[in-house]
Structure formats: structure tokens, C-alpha cells
Image: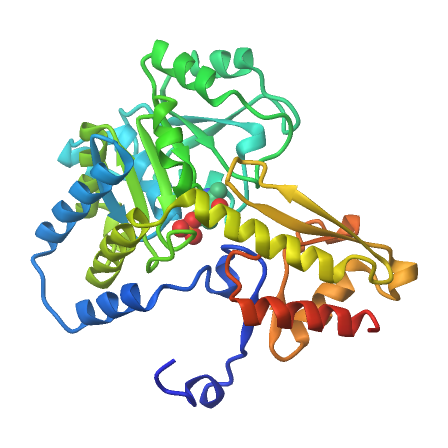
């Protein structure tokens, strides 16, 4: 930070983020170029419509979609995409939300896709005034379960989630998308952390794909919406309705433009091999610590990265996984791991957000706590 005392003055911790693109620790770190463009935008005026149009052009070119737009974040994009599926660009219907009288207002969601990313996705759907309809069970949702749910009266959209947060057997996204389209129903895919796979998700035939600009793209917080032109335009129509409180600011829009320009210069294969080197190095350092069993686990959603999984044996380590995670958070600097599965003895580290010095420090901190 430019003001070196800023964090200390406000009592803010230094953080090492090995938890991935995790919202509670600030998600990602922007490059100095993206930060500079974002800061410049704060000191300037823009015709916001021009900015949104420019963002739409850049997002479409980058993703290969017909059109694009930005909202405040992906949670907002979920709510506004559902709103768009219900209202289209009918100004009266837009102004009437979250009242949905006279509109198809049900959204089918595979039960295993009812994820919680800090908020239940079902709530983000309900915020538009819609009613989620869960298909199948958390463990298993067949194409037949989805087809039956889509045949109910009043369905506005099928929502699918591409994320490591989903539960149960994987849903065949392409087949589900086809089934919805055969029933004349729009498909929205929440792929919040899947910006590297945005073209893959669009290729499934989805009408809208939603990704977070602040996750691996490392832009300021924003929700990227790409897809079908009419539906993107219906998302933008919500800016005069429930979307008012979910708008992207000028600084975020400029920062996203800069981040996409930067991404286009990145060779993802080279990037993936750098991440693989980092995570393999870390595994070598932590392998053999008392009470730890290490393994590399590929991202289940299909991102080109592996995470380092630590299975903690409480007796040998002298503490269980949850205690280890808490002690790491309580340290200085505060080290954050992925601890969703701590009750099962499992912690994992994602190295993408770590610089070389931080990688080394993270390894030393963990080794230190486990007695080396
Ligand atoms: C992060 C995430 C969201 C929310 O994204 P924000 O941009 O933080 O609002 C939604 N869905 C999934 C699957 C996520 O991982």
C-alpha cells in the first residue's frame, strides 16, 4: 500500500491468502497496471453508458459471446439474470419487481447446485422475486429430474452452477441446457470462479454465463454477464429497477477493461505450468511433517490447477484440522487455508494467490506449528 502505516493505524492484519479466490480475505490481488487504471478512474468522469457499451464490446470479443455487461458482483448478476429472464426488457415489469404477478417466476436448479458461496444461491434467486424449484436430490439429479421440473407451469429459467462448491454426482450441463432449450426455457450458468473456462461454458449453449471479475481475473469487484444479446440487454434494463443497488461503479468497469486486456496477453498453458511448479514445491516442503498426509488434487470444476490437500491426523499432529486452521489464522501474518472440510480432517492450500516469498513463508509457518 502507498501509505505504509494504513493497516497498522486501522488495526488491520497482514494476510497470506492460501484459501484461493476467497471473499472473506479480499479474493485476489490486482496487478499494478489494473490498480493504476482503477485509481485513475476514481478521479475522473465518464459517460457511464459509454463505459458500459465499451465493456460490452470487450467482454463479447474476449468471451466469444454476442453481448456482455457488468453488475456489482456475481451474486448481483445471479439476481439480475433471473430478473431478466422473468421481465425481458418490459419497463413496467422491471419497475414492478420483486412483485412477479403475471410473470413466469420459477427457476429450476439441480438440488446439488444449491450452493452457498457466503450466501445461499437460492436467496440470490429469491431476491429477484422468483421462486427456486430444486430438481433431484443433493446427491443425484438426473436429466429426467430436470426435464420433469422444467415441465411445471411458470418456469422462467434453468440455473446451473459450475463450481467446486457443488454437491453430489456431476450434472451433465450440456444435456440439461439442451433439455431446457427444447422446452423453450432460458439457461443461466453461474461460473463465478470459471473465467478461464468462460468460452467452454458458453459453448454448452447457455443463454447467459456469469463470472466474477475479482476472482482469477484479479480485477476490482464486478459481475461479468455474457451471452445472448436480448437477455444481456434485459439484465441492463434492471439498472432502472432492482439493479440500482447492484450496479458496477466507474472504477470497477475501468478496472475490468484493464484486467481483460492483461488476460489476453497471458498464455494460460504457461500460467498453469507455473502454478503446478509452485504447488509441487510446497508439497515437497510439507510432506513428512508429523500428522500430515499430503496429496495434490485437481480442481473438480475443470480449472487448470491443483490444490495441496493436507489430511491431518489429530493424534500425531497434536491438534485437529480445525484447530490448526484457527492457529494459522491467529498468527502474524494471518495465514488462511481452505478449511470447508476441516471436520473431516482435511485442509487445502491454493497457491495461485501466493508470491514466491509468501509461498516460502506459508511453508515455514505450517512447519513451525507442527514442531519443526
Ligand atoms: C464467488 C461465487 C459467487 C459470488 O460471486 P461474487 O462475485 O462474490 O458475488 C457465486 N457463485 C459461486 C459458485 C461462487 O464461487
Q: Whole-percent x and y of residue 286?
A: 75, 61
Which is more toward the observer, 22 or 108?
A: 22
Judged left or right of residue 77, residue 323 is right
Point 48% across, 38% down: residue: 122
Point 43% across, 38% down: residue: 191
Q: Whole-percent x and y of residue 352?
A: 52, 56
* Image vertical order of residue 344 relative to residue 324, above or below: above
Tally the marks. 0
Q: Is residue 183 visible?
A: no
* Image vertical order of residue 71 relative to residue 302, above or below: below
Q: Is residue 189 visible?
A: yes
Q: Quadrant of residue 193?
A: top left
Point 33% across, 43% down: residue: 77
Q: Quadrant of residue 262?
A: bottom left
Judged left or right of residue 141, residue 107 is left
Which is more toward the observer, 41 or 149?
A: 41
Amino acid at each position: 500500500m502507498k501509505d505504509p502505516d494504513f493497516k497498522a493505524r486501522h488495526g488491520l492484519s497482514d494476510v497470506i491468502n492460501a484459501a484461493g479466490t476467497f471473499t472473506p480475505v479480499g479474493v485476489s490481488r490486482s496487478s499494478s497496471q489494473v490498480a493504476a487504471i482503477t485509481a485513475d478512474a476514481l478521479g475522473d468522469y465518464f459517460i457511464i453508458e459509454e463505459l458500459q457499451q465499451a465493456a460490452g464490446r470487450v467482454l463479447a470479443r474476449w468471451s466469444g459471446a454476442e453481448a456482455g455487461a457488468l453488475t456489482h458482483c456475481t451474486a448481483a448478476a445471479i439476481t439480475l439474470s433471473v430478473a431478466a429472464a422473468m421481465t425481458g426488457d418490459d419497463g413496467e415489469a422491471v419497475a414492478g419487481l420483486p412483485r412477479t404477478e403475471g410473470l413466469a417466476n420459477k427457476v429450476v436448479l439441480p438440488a446439488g447446485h444449491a450452493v452457498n458461496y457466503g450466501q445461499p444461491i437460492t436467496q440470490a434467486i429469491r431476491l429477484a422475486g422468483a421462486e427456486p424449484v430444486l430438481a433431484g436430490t443433493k446427491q443425484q439429479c438426473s436429466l429426467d429430474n430436470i426435464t420433469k421440473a422444467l415441465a411445471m407451469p411458470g418456469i422462467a429459467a434453468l440455473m446451473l452452477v459450475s463450481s467446486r462448491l457443488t454437491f453430489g454426482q456431476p450434472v451433465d450441463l450440456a444435456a440439461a441446457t439442451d433439455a431446457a432449450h427444447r422446452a423453450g426455457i432460458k439457461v443461466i450458468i453461474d461460473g463465478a470462479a470459471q473465467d478461464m473456462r468462460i468460452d467452454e461454458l458458453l459453448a454448452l449453449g447457455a443463454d447467459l454465463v456469469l463470472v466474477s471479475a475479482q476472482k482469477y481475473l484479479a480485477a476490482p469487484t464486478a459481475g461479468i454477464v455474457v451471452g445472448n444479446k436480448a437477455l444481456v440487454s434485459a439484465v441492463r434494463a434492471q439498472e432502472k429497477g432492482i439493479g440500482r443497488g447492484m450496479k458496477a461503479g466507474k472504477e470497477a468497469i475501468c478496472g475490468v477493461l484493464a484486467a481483460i486486456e492483461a488476460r489476453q496477453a497471458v498464455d494460460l498453458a504457461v500460467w498453469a505450468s507455473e502454478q503446478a511448479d509452485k504447488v509441487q514445491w510446497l508439497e515437497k516442503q510439507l510432506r513428512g511433517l508429523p500428522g500430515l498426509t499430503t496429496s495434490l488434487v485437481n480442481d473438480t470444476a475443470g480449472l487448470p490447477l491443483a490444490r495441496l490437500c493436507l489430511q491431518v491426523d489429530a493424534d500425531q499432529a497434536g491438534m485437529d484440522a480445525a484447530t490448526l486452521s484457527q492457529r494459522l489464522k491467529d498468527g502474524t501474518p494471518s495465514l488462511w487455508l481452505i478449511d470447508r472440510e476441516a471436520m473431516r480432517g482435511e485442509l487445502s492450500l491454493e497457491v495461485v494467490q501466493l508470491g514466491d516469498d509468501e509461498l516460502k513463508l506459508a511453508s515455514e509457518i505450517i512447519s513451525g506449528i507442527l514442531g519443526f
